[in-house]
Image (cartoon, rainbow, N blue to C red):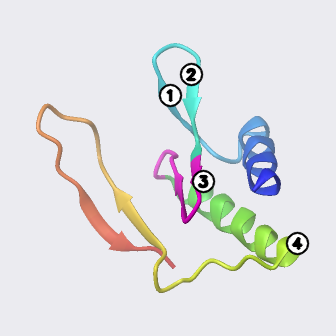
Amino acid sequence: MEFLSTHMNLSLAAGAIKPIKKGGEQVVSHLLFVDGMLFFSKGNVASLKTIDKVLELLAANTGLVINKLKKQSILQERMPKQTSLKGSYWG
């Protein structure tokens, strides 16, 4: 998964993914688990397309393919006092 983290970090550095900032300069862009991945970004089309391209690169270079039936995005407008999530499938 180093391949994935490296390409996510390169995309962040290039400005292709607009990250979510936590406090000052802390940036959260992705979390990797044994059996899953979470990606965080602003909800703009360019960021989402870049994440999709990184996943395609992962598949082409490692053979690890994302199951599109399980791929899901959760969109949230802002973090209000009461959190409401809007869910939809991405792909």
- Left or right: residue 43 compared with residue 76: right
Q: CA distance from mark 1 to mark 4?
A: 30 Å
Q: CA distance from mark 3 to mark 2?
A: 18 Å
Rendered position, 49 above or below 76: below
Amino acid identity at mark 3: Ser
Q: Is residue 32 magenta?
A: yes
Q: Callout 1: 10 Å neighbours few (<14), some, many (20+)?
A: some
- Left or right: residue 23 compared with residue 55: left
Q: Is residue 91 magenta?
A: no
Q: Residue under label 4, please give it.
A: 61
Secondary structure of residue under mark 3: helix
Front in this rendered view, residue 63 or 8: 63
Secondary structure of residue under mark 4: helix
**What residue sits 59% from the left and 60% below the top?**
34
Secondary structure of residue under mark 2: strand
**Sequence order check, earlier mark of 3 and 4:** 3
Range drawn in magenta: 31-43
**Sequence order check, earlier mark of 3 and 1:** 1
Amino acid identity at mark 1: Lys
Q: Callout 4: 10 Å neighbours few (<14), some, many (20+)?
A: few
Q: CA distance from mark 2 to mark 4?
A: 29 Å
Q: Residue under label 1, please give it.
A: 21
Secondary structure of residue under mark 1: strand
**What residue sits 61% from the left and 56% below the top?**
46
Q: Quadrant of residue 45?
A: bottom right
Which disc is residue 47 wearing?
3
- Left or right: residue 13 compared with residue 17: right
